[in-house]
């Protein structure tokens, strides 16, 4: 008998029929003798629907007071799906109880809409498990020190599940989703993408941070920090498949590099449309410029990703960087009103129609020429690279958004990632 955490994403919880299916699957695990904690997402589309309603009413609000209400609103999606799952389990004859984040409690900081989990009190959950109940804990949410409901950022239920698994020292955390594992790239963009049986923690961390939304990055960070055994698998297999077969399906995130692991130089391709580019043109090339521009942006709590400063011509230079697309308008505004007048820089240009495409693989450490193969492939497709950034195990480029699919498909082929390889 083991303590197991299951997480079910929005599509897996997308209708009463699907919730019933989840209940039958969880009941199968409980009947096999496991102590079960289940972390569901809101039913698919619900978080978007709620946030859409808020947008209709909000105008240009950015205040903390506004963000607080967004979290109070968005958290209701998971509360509903959790209670529905408890009801469905009870209908299967399985004692079950659902808790909202604040009832556990899952304690977070006060960064509304992107709160971080600080601690989880497991007493109440343990008591229920000992009494033979399945415990359902809402994904995506917690409570701050003042008792305000917080949410963990989009896709945050993955993080809730892994954090609960870490706090309770679960034997395994199983992330059930609408694909049957982690693929070499998003299988919805490249149908030839191949499922990985295992993926190293480091590669998964890079893929998640570079845009593969199959796992939220913080969930991977938690798994690494607390060594939580983590598996991504399908919720769409028949609920009554053999439990041992199910437990071995999907993709396992591994923490050790062993010989068994797939040793490709490039293991996967990640991409994101979530970024936007800002260029400040004609900046005087003198000390303190980067600090003036980026410091102002950072003070407004806007994260900067890639940065490029061109060589100067006639004492002037151009300075470009990328930010999250949601922060683009705010960052442009700040630069125009606060920075340009002081710098005497003539112009700031914004481009939200960009995307970032990245190749990831721990094999890149020991191979030279991987990045240049990437550039050659993009050039053969006539795709212009606007920015580049590299680390030991990844190379990322910023390109025009309209070439996203073309770039990902071409790179997938160039690095031999298709199904019939390996
Ligand atoms: P859930 O609602 O279960 O959390 P998400 O939509 O957040 O599901 O994440 C699953 C989706 O992630 C898949 O449907 C797939 O389109 C996308 N995805 C992106 N990159 C990958 C990848 N490398 N492997 C598998 N899925 C990926
Ligand atoms: N419901 C939240 C979202 O849509 C959290 C999640 O699904 O993980 O972002
Ligand atoms: Mg998700």
Image (cartoon, helix red, strand yellow):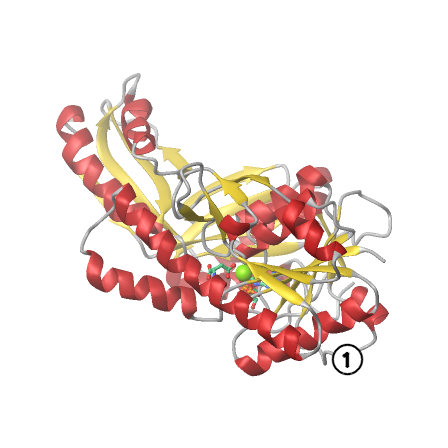
Determine the secondary structure under disc 1.
loop
Q: Can residue 268 be seen in this view?
A: yes
Residue that protrudes farthest toward the bottom in the picture: 17
- Point 79% across, 78% down: residue: 241
Q: Where is residue 56 in the image (x, y as percent from the top left)?
A: 22, 64
Image quarter hosting the N terminus = bottom right
Mark 1 = which residue? 240
- Neighbor class of circle 1 (other Cα within 10 Å; few <14, some 14-19, many 20+) is few
Residue occupying the point 35% across, 39% down:
321
**Quadrant in which the C terminus is drawn:** bottom right
Residue 257 coordinates in the image, percent (x, y)? 80, 43
Residue at the limit of the structure toward the top, as seen here: 287
Q: Residue at x 73, y 39 (%)?
A: 366
Taking depth in this image into account, of 215 and 134 the one nearest to the observer is 134
Q: Which of 144 and 406 is in front in this view?
A: 144
Q: Is residue 100 above or below residue 284?
A: below
């Amino acid at each position: 008998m083991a303590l197991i955490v299951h997480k079910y994403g929005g599509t897996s919880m997308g209708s009463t029929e699907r919730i019933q299916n989840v209940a039958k699957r969880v009941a199968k695990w409980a009947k096999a003798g496991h102590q079960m904690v289940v972390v569901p997402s809101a039913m698919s589309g619900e978080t978007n629907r709620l946030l859409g309603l808020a947008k209709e009413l909000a105008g240009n609000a950015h205040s903390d007071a506004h963000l607080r209400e967004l979290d109070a609103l968005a958290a209701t999606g998971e509360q509903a799906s959790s209670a529905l799952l408890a009801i469905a389990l009870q209908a299967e004859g399985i004692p079950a109880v659902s808790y909202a984040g604040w009832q556990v409690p899952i304690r977070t900081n006060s960064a509304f809409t992107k709160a971080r989990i600080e601690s989880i009190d497991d007493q109440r959950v343990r008591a229920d498990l000992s009494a033979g109940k399945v415990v359902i804990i809402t994904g995506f949410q917690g409570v701050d020190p003042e008792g305000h409901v917080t949410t963990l950022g989009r896709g945050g239920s993955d993080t809730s599940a892994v954090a609960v698994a870490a706090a309770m020292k679960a034997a395994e955390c199983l992330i059930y989703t609408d694909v049957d594992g982690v693929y070499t790239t998003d299988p919805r963009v490249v149908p030839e993408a191949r499922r990985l049986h295992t993926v190293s923690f480091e590669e998964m961390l890079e893929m998640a941070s570079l845009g593969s939304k199959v796992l939220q990055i913080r969930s991977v960070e938690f798994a690494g920090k607390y060594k939580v055994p983590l598996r991504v698998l399908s919720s769409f297999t028949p609920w009554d498949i053999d439990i041992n077969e199910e437990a071995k399906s999907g993709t396992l995130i591994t923490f050790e590099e062993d010989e068994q692991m797939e040793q490709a130089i490039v293991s996967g391709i990640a991409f994101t449309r979530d970024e936007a580019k800002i260029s400040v043109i004609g900046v005087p090339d003198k000390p303190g410029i980067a600090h003036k521009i980026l410091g102002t942006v950072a003070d407004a709590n806007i994260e900067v990703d890639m940065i490029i400063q061109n060589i100067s011509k006639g004492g002037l230079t151009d300075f470009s960087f990328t930010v999250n697309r949601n922060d683009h308008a705010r960052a442009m505004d700040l630069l125009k009103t606060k920075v340009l007048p002081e710098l005497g820089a003539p112009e700031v240009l914004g481009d939200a129609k960009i995307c970032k495409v990245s190749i990831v693989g721990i094999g890149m450490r020991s191979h030279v020429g991987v990045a240049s193969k990437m550039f050659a492939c993009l050039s053969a497709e006539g795709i212009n690279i606007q920015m580049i950034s590299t680390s030991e195990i990844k190379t990322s480029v910023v390109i025009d958004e309209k070439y996203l699919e073309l770039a990902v498909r071409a790179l997938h082929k160039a690095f031999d990632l298709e199904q019939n390889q390996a």
